[in-house]
Amino acid sequence: MADMAKTGSGLFGNEFKYEEPEFRVTNELPDAAGREPKMMLWSYTGNDILGMVPRLQKVATTCEQVPDATGREPKVLLWCFEGNDILGLVPRLEKVSSTCEKLMGGDELYHYHTKIMMKDAKKGGSFEWHQDYGYWYKNGNLRPDLISMFLAVDPCIKENGGLQVLVGSHNGGRVDHTFDGGQQGADKERVEHLKKIYPHYYFNIDSIPGDCILFHCNLLHSSGPNDSAQRRWAFNCSYNKRSNNPVKKHHHPFYHKLDKGKEFVDPATDETVKAGSKGEAIEAK
């Protein structure tokens, strides 16, 4: 398996790019994420995403609209269990799930939910400033031991309502959340104070689909309205630690083992064959 780049790039030194079909996470990645930002931009080949776009377009008709504080409505489609279609592949990918586990200290994670966030051209609404843990806390998750992957299906830029964060704001702890329009929003006064401490950063993902951002559940983030002529769709997978199993029943699941896909058999353990010498690794095409 190929190693990741030894050092991160970008403004905060936490941007990594995976170009090989297989890789393993080395210590440099969690070290970079463990520094102040507690987030990273992660770019990898977009084939996984390109393959699921037709399915996204088919299921998007069942989404719900969640009005922002001004009444404009971004759309959300959410499911809790991975399923067996191509949309269920992404949260089970080793390069997603195992990377998130590494960032969270190596403890087992399970799939908490996946959602598609959609902003129509010219009319898509905002997602107000919030922490994911601001409302997941209300679901009976006792600790902020959750992580999310935000994945750009379309270009994700400021003009079409792209993602913005307060870098390092996870260090400010959980902020109280209440309804802001139809959404859960962080206390506005506290957010304004935190803006004076933590850099306000806009992600500009205008390359091919497949760029990802991994971030801790206490990171304050938001996204503005889409006033552009280009739609903005994003795919978001969230994971919870097995050890943080919720203490009450709610609309997301309790712990269930995440099936990460193939697990190759070691020929040395197969008593029905006599294994020969190990061959050279075959590069995936």
Image (tube, helix red, strand yellow):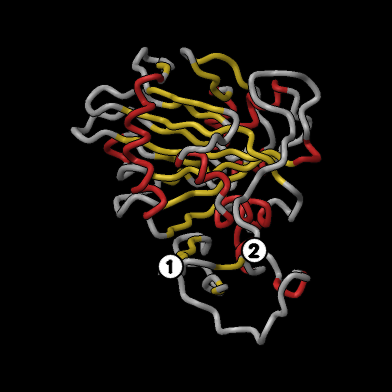
| Foreground pick, 193 / 246 | 246
Q: Which residue is mark 2?
A: 264
Between 70 and 67, the residue placed more toward the observer is 67
Q: Label 1 vs label 2: CA separation?
A: 22 Å
Picture quadrant of residue 225: top left
The extreme left residue here reads: 229
N-term-proximal mark, 1 vs 2:
1
> Which residue corresponds to mark 1?
19
Name the amino acid, label 2: Phe
Q: Quadrant of the N terminus?
A: bottom right
Residue that appears at 72% across and 79% down? 274
Residue at the location (68% across, 57% down)? 102
Mark 1 and 2 residues: CB-CB less than 8 Å, in contact?
no
Question: As shown in the figure, which amino acid type bears the numbered disc 1?
Answer: Glu
Residue ranking furthest to the front: 272
Label 2's element?
loop
User: Which residue is at 70% across, 51% downward?
Assistant: 104
> Relative to residue 277, is residue 231 drawn left or right?
left
